[in-house]
Amino acid sequence: MNLYLIKLGKAIAAVQRDGIIVGGRRSLSYLRTFFKTALSFKSGDVLFITGGVGDSADYRSHRVAEELNLHGINAEVTMQDNPFLPLFANKFSVFVFHRTLVTSSVKKLIKNIKKQNKEIIFETDDLVFDTKYMHATGSYEKMSYFEKKQYAKGVGEEILRDEYIKVCSTSTKYLANILAGYNKKVFIVKNKISDHDLEVTEKIICNNKNLKNSFIRIGYFSGTMSHNRDFATIADALLEIMEKYPQTKLILAGPLEVENKLNKFKDRIEQSPFVPRDKHFENISNVDINLAPLEIGDPYCESKSELKFFEAGIMNVPTVASATQVFCEAISDGVDGFVANGTTEWVEKLEKLIVDKEFRVRMGKQARVTVLKKYTNKNSHNEEYYNYLRSKL
């Protein structure tokens, strides 16, 4: 199906699901980015070709491009919708394809790149390239007809299986191990806080009017419908916590269906829709504890990055996360956050943060120290990746 029809269908679905204001905002965001990139015809060292405009495209294309520019590698980003896409083969040395559907335009670009014997890198931050994982997610079940068309085949699978392409980049060790099974050299490029986000978060912290009150606000920032199953894994723990501690409130942001068992506390549950990124950080700053649940052992969930930990950590907010591989690697349990496995551990660790404010504040501050050191473009240091790219220029 034509890519533009898929995009139009997704825009209509967003309006139907999120309402005219929120859904319309998402669609306008796509249009702004499309026209910005379609009218840009720059040249440089590395070009990121991305399939969308959401958080994934932001983190895996725009932010990585910023990181490379900070290290002296001239990187630019365009969308696969760009009508001049095949012509970019002459203007860059390395081409990174992120969540890119194989359209006729993409095929022409790849053909032109191969003619010039230039470097192509397959990039992913999810298991969307393998349909056996993607089609089993809650997110896929909730998609509209047009959204499912985008994922009818593995996103970028044809590019990944191309023998010409020897290198991949990704966000986690879990994904790196899977990609290595395709006989590729794999670079782990962690998701990071951009310079803009760093400025925004510092300003919020400096100007914070401390909206927190006698309630302990526990926040979950879901992002997509795929997190309904993740949230369900901690529903029993939250039920126990909210029954035991009447001073707690549950703050839910993003498209999420609340478990029926929690409806008895609906007067202590606040839900908010999708918001722009700057507002997103402000919302995080107004909670006391951040939740990052995932289905432990599920391949699609295990491939997720530690993004929810560092987005909260940069705001001095401590996180309790599921004990997936990536969260166990990112979080020093009991120091800059908590990892938990099972209802008992979730209750135990949430309780520690609820009853001891000094401990909660201290853990939040330590989380920010960790994030500033390991998860900002400003302090990025992935020399093996940078040197590989330089060798191809």
Image (cartoon, grey):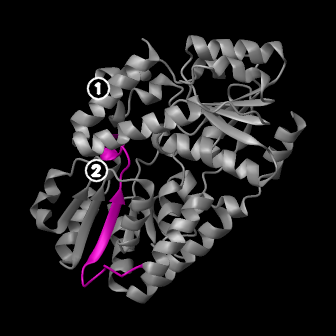
| Residue at the (29%, 46%) spot, across then down | 255
Which residue sits furthest bottom?
Answer: 358
- The three-letter amino acid code for the residue at tag 1 is Ser
Residue 306 image offset from top left, x and y in percent:
53, 55
- The three-letter amino acid code for the residue at tag 2 is Ala
Give the alpha-carbon distance from disc 1 to disc 2, as whole Å.
Answer: 22 Å
- State which region is magenta: 208-229
- On screen, residue 312 versus residue 138, left or right, reads right
| Residue at the (81%, 12%) spot, across then down | 115
Which residue sits furthest front?
Answer: 39
| Residue at the (29%, 26%) spot, across then down | 144
- On screen, residue 49 versus residue 132, left or right, reads right
- Give SS at disc 1: loop
Is residue 209 rendered magenta in the image? yes
Camera-nearest label, 1 or 2? 1
CB under 8 Å between discs 1 and 2: no
Which of the pair 108/249 is nearer the observer?
108
Residue 292's quadrant in the figure? bottom left
Task: Let me know if residue 323 appears in the view.
Answer: no
Q: Tell me the residue that label 2 is attached to.
A: 232
Q: Tell me the residue that label 1 is attached to.
A: 144
Is residue 212 rendered magenta in the image? yes
